Each structure stands twice: as structure tokens, then as C-alpha cells.
């Protein structure tokens, strides 16, 4: 009588099954990693358009820094965000929203350089959706602000009026090259009063002097979503 040995065959099958499941596990793990990477890229906006936008923004900021230095104009420029911070001491008297004579002189030099640098570069100009003028204050209270609500309101009001004063100067001042881009500039400008909501923190404490400022912030377009929609249509 011949006996059929099943043992070796079963052992071989088990080995094959183990290899199969190991391979499937590696494949599923790989797919999961790819999915996670794509998900992170999606939520962080990591697109080719975003990379190009950042490059354009940095190149513009670098060019602006050089122009400001050449003309001895003091301004804090963040090259990665394109945000410019101007101290309130350059523009206003204490607790005032009216431009000081020093402020007018500062803007008379700053404004032509800033807007001509933006508007004369077609690559920068076509990618801008908005130029925001933001007013900021520190968190210190006014003498007549007897409640937290009044303190908050007065700081918000002062910051908005200061931003509006800078915008008013930009709109009505005259300089070489303005006529060529005036209408485009008017469509881009907007004003915001941030009050005490975004203080400048140094070594864990608010720097009151640096918190009192006016910022000019460029918002660049991100067409990646629109392009995706158009490609589907």
C-alpha cells in the first residue's frame, strides 16, 4: 500500500502563502505611504503653481530690498512672504493717525519704488490678486479706555485710520510712472485694521515699539484649483 504524504505539500503551500501575504503587506504599505504623501501635499497646497508663486514672490522681494537700500529707505522686508513692515515712528506722532511731516517724506520716497517695482515687472504684476495695507497697534491701553471693550475698539479704530492714511497718500500722491499703472493699482489696493491682534513677540514678551506698525502685504494668485476644474471640463 502506498501512502501519500501530505505533510511536505502542506509545508510548501504554507511557504507560498506566507510569501504572498508578505508581498501584499509590502504593497499595501507602499500604497498607504503614497496616499499619505499625496494627502499632505494636497492639504499644504504643495503644487507646481505654488512653487512658482513662491519663486516669483522671493525674486520680487529681493529686487525691492535692493532698491530700498540703494535709496537709504528703512523697512523690514520678509523676502519669503513679501510682507513689508514700517514702524509707526516713521509715519505718525504718538496716538495719531495723521501722517507726520516725517511720514510724508518717508512715503514720498518709498511709494514710487514700491509700486514701480511691482507694476513694471509683468511676471509679478499678473500674479498679484491684492495689495493689502494693514494697520497694527500694541496692546497698551489708552488713558480714557476704562473697559477691555473700549481698549480693543480704540486700538482697532486707530489701526484702521492709520492704514487708511497711508492708502490716501498712495492714492493722491504723484510720481513718475504712476499714470501707467494707476488703474491697475486701484483695483489691487485694500485696507485693514488689525488693532492689537497680531503683536510682535520678542523673547516671550510683546515688543510694543515693533507692534506699532503699518504693513504692506501682497497676495499672489493661486490658479491651481481653477486649472484643475478647467482640465476636468
Image: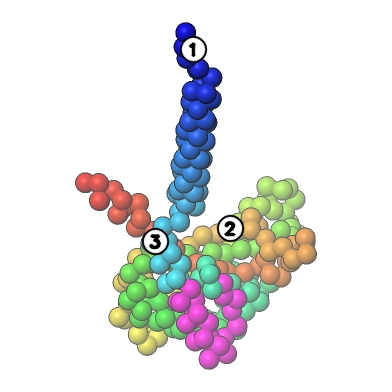
Horizontal and vertical percent position of residue 11: 53, 25
Give the number of the disc on residue 194: 2
Left or right: 80 as drawn, with respect to 206: left
- Say above or below: 159 vs 123: above
The magenta segment is: 58-78
Q: Earlier in the sequence, mark 1 or mark 2?
A: 1
Q: Looking at the image, which residue sits at the far left?
A: 233
Q: Earlier in the sequence, mark 1 or mark 3?
A: 1
Q: Looking at the image, which residue sits at the far top?
A: 1
Question: Is 76 a magenta residue?
Answer: yes
Judge the density around disc 1: few (<14), some (14-19), many (≥20) Cα neighbours within 10 Å: few
Residue 154, quarter of picture: bottom right
Residue visible at 54% across and 64% down in the picture: 134
Decide if residue 105 is in sight here. Answer: no
Cβ atoms under marks 1 and 2 closer than 8 Å: no
Which residue is the site of mark 1? 3
State whether the magenta stretch is mostly helix, strand or loop: helix
Helix, strand or loop status at disc 2: strand
Distance CA(mark 2)–CA(mark 3): 32 Å
Q: Nearer the viewer, residue 160 or 119?
A: 119
Cβ atoms under marks 2 and 3 closer than 8 Å: no
- Say above or below: 196 vs 84: above
Give the number of the disc on residue 114: none
Residue visible at 53% across and 82% down in the picture: 65
Amino acid at each position: 500500500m502506498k501512502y501519500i504524504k501530505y505533510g511536505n505539500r502542506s509545508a510548501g503551500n504554507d511557504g507560498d502563502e506566507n510569501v504572498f501575504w508578505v508581498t501584499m503587506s509590502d504593497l499595501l504599505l507602499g500604497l498607504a505611504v503614497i496616499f499619505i504623501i499625496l494627502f499632505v501635499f494636497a492639504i499644504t497646497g504643495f503644487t507646481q503653481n505654488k512653487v512658482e508663486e513662491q519663486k516669483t514672490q522671493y525674486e520680487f522681494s529681493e529686487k525691492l530690498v535692493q532698491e530700498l537700500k540703494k535709496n537709504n529707505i528703512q523697512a523690514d522686508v520678509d523676502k519669503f512672504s513679501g510682507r513689508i513692515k514700517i514702524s509707526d515712528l516713521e509715519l505718525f506722532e504718538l496716538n495719531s493717525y495723521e501722517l507726520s511731516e516725517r511720514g510724508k517724506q518717508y512715503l514720498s520716497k518709498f511709494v514710487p519704488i514700491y509700486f514701480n517695482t511691482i507694476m513694471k515687472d509683468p511676471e509679478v504684476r499678473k500674479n498679484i490678486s491684492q495689495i493689502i495695507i494693514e494697520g497694527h497697534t500694541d496692546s497698551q491701553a489708552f488713558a480714557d479706555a476704562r473697559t477691555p471693550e473700549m481698549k480693543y475698539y480704540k486700538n482697532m479704530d486707530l489701526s484702521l485710520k492709520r492704514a487708511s492714511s497711508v492708502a490716501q497718500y498712495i492714492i493722491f500722491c504723484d510720481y513718475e510712472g504712476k499714470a501707467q499703472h494707476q488703474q491697475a493699482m486701484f483695483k489691487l489696493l485694500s485696507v485693514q485694521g488689525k488693532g492689537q491682534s497680531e503683536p510682535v513677540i520678542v523673547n516671550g514678551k510683546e515688543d510694543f515699539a515693533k507692534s506699532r506698525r503699518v504693513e504692506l502685504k501682497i497676495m499672489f494668485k493661486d490658479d491651481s484649483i481653477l486649472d484643475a476644474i478647467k482640465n476636468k471640463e
